[in-house]
C-alpha cells in the first residue's frame, strides 16, 4: 500500500486544529497498514507552515500557487486532483469541515473513487477500508465497508481524533507543480468575515458553563452568565435555549450545534440527550448539576450534583472564590 495523504487546512497563516487531528488519524492508520503519511499543503507563500508541519510529520508536499492563496474549491480541486495523480496515495484524508465538505465530493467525482464522509474511525484490513460513522443523530455507530478500490477519500469529523503536534523525526519538504486553469469565475473569493469583537467562539474555550431547560425564566440567564464570567468561562447551551432565543445559535452544543473540547464543562439543568452529548468531546472534566438523579448527563459526568442549580450556584461561586483567594 502506498501513502496516506492528509490535506492541511489553514487560514490567515495558521493551521487549523483539524490538520493535527487528521495527522493523528493518518499516523494511526499508517501504523496499522504499514504505509507512510504525507501532508499536502496548498496555498501561497506557505513556507512557514510547511516548516511547522515538517517538524511533526515526515513528509510535507507543498503546492505553492498564487491562485491557491485563499480556499476556493474549484482551484483546490484542480490542484489536488493533479497532486493525487502524481503521488497515487491509497487514502486521502480531509476534515469534515466547510472546506472539506465542499471539496471532497468534487475530488472524489473527478477521480471516480469512493468517498466516505464524517468518519469518527477508520481501519484498513488489507486494502479494504472500513469507516465508523454515526447515524440517526449519533444514536447508532455503524461500520461501513467501502467499495473495494485502489484509492479512497474520507472526511474526518472534528474532535474525533486527538490533535498530535508532537515533533517526530525531522521531516522533508518537497514541492509539486500543478497547472491551474484560468477560473471560470463561477466561484471566487471575496473576503473573510471575522467574528465581531466580543463574539465568543465556544469551540476555543477552556471553560464552558452550559445551560438547558432547567433555566425556566430568561431573567435567570443573568445569574448563570455572572457565574460563568466569575470562573473565567463562557456560556453555551442546549437547543431549547436557542429555540427560546435566549442565546445565539453559535452557542449551541450538540449534533446540530458545535463540537467543543473544553478543559471544564459545567452543565446546568441539561438532561443529557444524545444529541447534546454528541457535541462534547472527551478529555476534560464534566460536571453536571441536575435535580433529577436519573438524568442521562450523570452517566458521562466526572462529578454530579443532584440538586436545584439555583441553590448550588451561589455555594459553588463562593467556594471557587475562596479557593482562588487562598491560592
Ligand atoms: C435532529 C435533532 C437534533 C438535535 N440537536 C441538538 C443539539 O445539537 N443540541 C442539543 O442540546 N439538543 C439537540 N436536540 C434536542 C435534544 O433532543 C433535547 O431535546 C435537548 O438537548 C434537551 O435540552 P435540555 O436538556 O436543556 O432540556 P430537557 O431535556 O428538558 O432537560 C432539562 C433538565 O433540567 C433539569 N432541571 C430542571 N430544573 C432544574 C433546576 N432548577 N436545577 C437543576 N436541574 C433542573 C431537569 O431535571 C432536566 O433533566 C436535537 C434534537 C433533534 C431531533
Image (tube, rainbow, N blue to C red):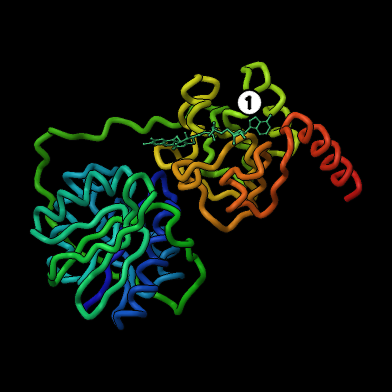
Residue at image position (49%, 65%) is 165
For this orientation, the residue located farthest to the bottom is 34
Residue that mark 1 sits on: 215
Point out residue 325 in the picture as x, y percentages from the top left corner.
Answer: 89, 43
Residue at image position (54%, 29%) is 199
Query: Residue 42: which quarter of the image?
Result: bottom left
Point out residue 208 in the picture as x, y percentages from the top left corner.
Answer: 62, 41
Query: Residue 271: which quarter of the image?
Result: top right
Is residue 292 rendered to the left or right of residue 201? right
- Asked if one can make out residue 60 in the rendered structure from this viewpoint, the answer is yes
Ligand 1 within 8 Å of disc 1? The answer is yes
Comparing 48 with 135, the one in front is: 135
Query: Residue 171: which quarter of the image?
Result: bottom left
Is residue 187 rendered to the left or right of residue 206? left
For this orientation, the residue located farthest to the right is 326
Q: Residues within 10 Å of mark 1 (few under 14, many from 20)?
A: some
Residue at image position (16%, 68%) is 151
Dot 1 lies on which element? loop
Amino acid at each position: 500500500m502506498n501513502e496516506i495523504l492528509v490535506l492541511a487546512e489553514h487560514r490567515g497563516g495558521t493551521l487549523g486544529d483539524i490538520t493535527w487531528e487528521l495527522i493523528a488519524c493518518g499516523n494511526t492508520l499508517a501504523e496499522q497498514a504499514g504505509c507512510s503519511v504525507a501532508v499536502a499543503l496548498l496555498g501561497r507563500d506557505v513556507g512557514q507552515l510547511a516548516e511547522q508541519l515538517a517538524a511533526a510529520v515526515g513528509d510535507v508536499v507543498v503546492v505553492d500557487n498564487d491562485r491557491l492563496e485563499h480556499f476556493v474549491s474549484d482551484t483546490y480541486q484542480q490542484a489536488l486532483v493533479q497532486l493525487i495523480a502524481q503521488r497515487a496515495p491509497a487514502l486521502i484524508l480531509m476534515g469534515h469541515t466547510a472546506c472539506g465538505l465542499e471539496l471532497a465530493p468534487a475530488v472524489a467525482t473527478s477521480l471516480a473513487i469512493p468517498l466516505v464522509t464524517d468518519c469518527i474511525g477508520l481501519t484498513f484490513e488489507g486494502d479494504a477500508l472500513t469507516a465508523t460513522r454515526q447515524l440517526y443523530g449519533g444514536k447508532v455507530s455503524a461500520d461501513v465497508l467501502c467499495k473495494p478500490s485502489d484509492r479512497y477519500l474520507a472526511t474526518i469529523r472534528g474532535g474525533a481524533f486527538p490533535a498530535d503536534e508532537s515533533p517526530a523525526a525531522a521531516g522533508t519538504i518537497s514541492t509539486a507543480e500543478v497547472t491551474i486553469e484560468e477560473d471560470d469565475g463561477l466561484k471566487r473569493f471575496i473576503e473573510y468575515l471575522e467574528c465581531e469583537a466580543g463574539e465568543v467562539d465556544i469551540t476555543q474555550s477552556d471553560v464552558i458553563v452550559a445551560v438547558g431547560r432547567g433555566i425556566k425564566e430568561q431573567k435567570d440567564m443573568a445569574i448563570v452568565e455572572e457565574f460563568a464570567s466569575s470562573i473565567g468561562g463562557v456560556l453555551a447551551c442546549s437547543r431549547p435555549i436557542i429555540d427560546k432565543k435566549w442565546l445565539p445559535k453559535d452557542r449551541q452544543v450538540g449534533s446540530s450545534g458545535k463540537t467543543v473540547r473544553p478543559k471544564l464543562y459545567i452543565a446546568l439543568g441539561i438532561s443529557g440527550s444524545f444529541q447534546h452529548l454528541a457535541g462534547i468531546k472527551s478529555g476534560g472534566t464534566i460536571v453536571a448539576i441536575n435535580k433529577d438523579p436519573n438524568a442521562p448527563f450523570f452517566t458521562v459526568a466526572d462529578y454530579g450534583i443532584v440538586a436545584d442549580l439555583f441553590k448550588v450556584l451561589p455555594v459553588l461561586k463562593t467556594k471557587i472564590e475562596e479557593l482562588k483567594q487562598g491560592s
